Image (cartoon, grey):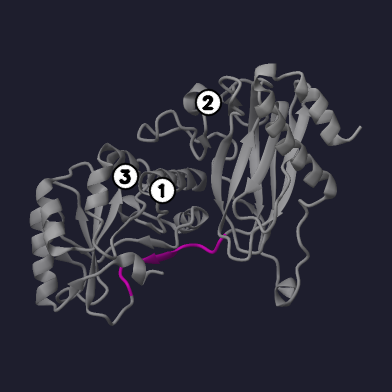
Amino acid sequence: MSISSRMSTRLSGGVSGRRSGRRSGRLAALTASAALLTAGLAGPAAATGPEAAAPAAPAVNLATNPGFEVPSSSLADWGSVPGWRCSGGPAEASVTTNVPHSGASALAVTPAGDESTGECVQTVSVRPGTTYTASAWVRGKFVFLGATGGTDRPTAPAWTESTNGGWQKLTTRFTAGPTATTVRLTVHGWYQQGPFAVDDVRVDGPAPAPATAAASVATSDKVVFFTVDDGWQTTPEAERLIADHQLPITAFPLPMAAANNPDYFRRVTTAPGSSVQNHSVSHPDLTKLSPAEQQVEICDARDSLTRLFGTTPTVFRPPFFAWNPDTLQAAANCGMRTVLTADADFSWGASNIWHEGTLSPGDVVLLHWTDTLAEDLRRALAAADVAGLKPAGLASYLR
């Protein structure tokens, strides 16, 4: 009996007659995946041309929180599993210490109701046109591991009918599309098949090139860049000044602060050139964190801000301007192209320029969302005017 026939027979008795239409659609999708798998379409394309002769970059694990060992921040999304977004939230998915495959913990998922597969996903940054191997250890019935949304062709998931109470390794391969920089890694169960567990996830292949560190922008244009951090204090005075002057603002809000008042941040970033960028989840000193913990801080902030505002950040502002080489790689693994500090600070009444003379073309000015921001912006505008500079949008200069 074929894989698809066995799966159809196995699952057909587990779905009630009331849902026969939905069952047919689900089984069709599932058996299509099985057909892809048996046809061998998940294998990588052969390398051709000059790239085939280039030395291979070392393979590393690009998955975020692959062993579910990084603790959740108190400022993270409600009930979230660090590095992952699970469709049912904490009602379905949580970290457990009950018999992990390795380490101290694993992901435990109990789909809530007949309509859920308990899917958990994460965005993985990849190199275009490059082949990767995804794997995970799973426990349960009908557990799936797949990659979508960036592969060069449909890639069948790896799956198991049952692990018979133990742990089983699933492995699949995919090739990123010629212009793709991310893929969507998914793990999930199947309808009415009960709980499952996942541990030791891997996406093995070459990492993206490290992000670029910068404190200013190399340009001869007579421009300066206003960047505003954190977001806990949002005043109407600052909003009016930004609107009156049509100031291009690069906002670096913490996700929870942004979620408290997302409409405010949408309004203050409407001027052309404005954008919302990444400032971590919980504002830690990243140099005191492991590379895996840094990656969770940056990737989870990226995901939260993307859901709130519909655009994905590409610039990361390290809290306290504290970063190390691990930060540059963690930022790149989360899709950040630039790790940005500043070379002037006009926060809380200050007028500090960290180089000789007045503001210079390409300077990045640090400010904060505080009750003094309106006055701080006036002082920064005056300093820019003295230097013959105009505020400009940062993101367009960093492309």
Question: SS for tag 3?
Answer: loop
Residue contact between numbered discs 3 and 1, judged by CB atoms under 8 Å: no
Q: Is residue 210 magenta?
A: yes
Q: Is residue 184 magenta?
A: no
Residue that appears at 59% across and 22% down: 110
Horizontal placement of 138 versus 299: left or right? right
> Given the image, on which type of amino acid does mark 1 rest?
Thr
Q: Name which of mark 2 and mark 3 comes first in the sequence.
A: 2
| Nearer to me, 111 or 381 | 111
Q: Residues within 10 Å of mark 2 (few under 14, many from 20)?
A: some
Residue 371 appears in the picture as rendered:
no
Return the residue found at the far right: 1
| x then y, percent, for residue 174 | 70, 53
Horizontal placement of 352 versus 83: left or right? left
| x then y, percent, for residue 290 | 48, 45
Rendered-image quadrant of the C terminus? bottom left
| x then y, percent, for residue 351 | 12, 63
* Residue holding disc 2: 94
Nearer to us of marks 3 and 1 is 1
Tell me which segment is drawn in magenta.
208-217
Residue 356 appears in the picture as rendered:
yes
Residue that appears at 79% across and 40% down: 34
> Given the image, on which type of amino acid does mark 3 rest?
Leu
The numbered mark at residue 306 is 1
Q: Residues within 10 Å of mark 3 (few under 14, many from 20)?
A: many
Q: Name which of mark 1 and mark 2 comes first in the sequence.
A: 2
* Residue holding disc 3: 254
Tell me the CA gap for discs 1 and 2: 23 Å
> Given the image, on which type of amino acid does mark 2 rest?
Ser
Residue contact between numbered discs 1 and 2, judged by CB atoms under 8 Å: no
Question: SS for tag 2?
Answer: strand
